[in-house]
Image: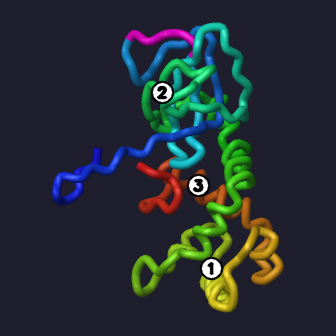
Amino acid sequence: MIILERGYTQPRKYEEYAYVLDFNERGRSFTVRGREGIIVTAIGEDRLTMLEILGVPDSTFEVGERIYIGKEGRTKVQSVLGKLEYKKISDNAKSELAGVVNKIVTSNEKRFIEYINNAQPLTPRIHALELIPGIGKTYMKQMLDERDKKLFASYDDLQSRVGLKEPIKHIAKRILEEITGETRMNLFVKR
C-alpha cells in the first residue's frame, strides 16, 4: 500500500493479464522456496515486468498466450509467485521475449500512442521521446510539431505524418532494453 497524507491509502496496482514466455510442467519456483508444479514465466501486459506464475494442475499453456492473472476469477493460474529478473529466465523465455513484446505493443496501440502524445522533456537537453531507439533530435522535433497541431491517433497516423517507419518496432526495442537492464532510466517497464 502507498500511504498518502491524512491516512488515505491508494491500493497497489497489480497486473490483470500476462503473456506466457515459457512454462515447465514439472518446474521448481525461483521466487518461492519449495513451490513446485506448472511454473510459467510470463511478462505482465501493463507493467511489463517478468513474472513467475504457478499454474493450476492439469492446465495447458502456450507460448505467447495472454492469460488472466488478476485477483478474482482466475481459471488457469493458481498464484503469481513473484517478479523475476531477466537473467533468471530460461533461454527459451529470452528467445520468445521480442515476439511477445511486439505483440503487446501492437495490441496496446492506444496506450503507447497516448505515451507519445504526452511525453515530456526529462532534462533541458533530453526529451523522453529521444530515448526510444530510432528517434533522434530530427524525428523528435517533427513529432512535437505535428502533435502540437493534432494529437496522433494511431501508429499509422504517426508514421504517415512524421515518416517514422515501424513505430511498433522502435517502442518494442526500447522495452526490451529496459527489461534486459541496458538502460539507466525506464519509460515503459515498472520496477
Q: Indicate the amino acid at tag 2.
A: Val
Q: Indicate the amino acid at tag 3.
A: Ile
Task: Judge left or right: residue 12 versus residue 72.
Answer: left
Task: Judge left or right: residue 21 versus residue 78.
Answer: right
Q: Please give the range of residues in magenta.
A: 34-38
Q: Residue at x 39, y 19 (%)?
A: 32
Are the residues flagged by discs 2 and 3 in contact, CB closer than 8 Å? no
Q: Which residue is label 3 attached to?
A: 175
Position in image of residue 106 (x %, y %): 74, 54
Residue situated in front as seen by the camera: 126 or 106: 106
3D distance between C-alphas at marks 1 and 2: 39 Å
Position in image of residue 104 (x %, y %): 68, 49
Q: Is residue 60 above or below residue 161?
A: above
Q: Earlier in the sequence, mark 2 or mark 3?
A: 2
Which labelled disc corresponds to residue 136?
1
Does the stretch in magenta take in 36?
yes
Q: Nearer the viewer, mark 1 or mark 2?
A: 2
**For residue 134, what is the image quadrant?**
bottom right
Q: Earlier in the sequence, mark 1 or mark 2?
A: 2
Q: Earlier in the sequence, mark 1 or mark 3?
A: 1
Q: Residue at x 67, y 47 (%)?
A: 101
Q: Which residue is label 2 attached to?
A: 80
Q: Indicate the amino acid at tag 1.
A: Gly
Magenta segment's dominant SS is strand
Does the stretch in magenta take in 81?
no
Near mark 2 (Cα within 10 A), the count class, few <14, some 14-19 or many ≥20, is: some
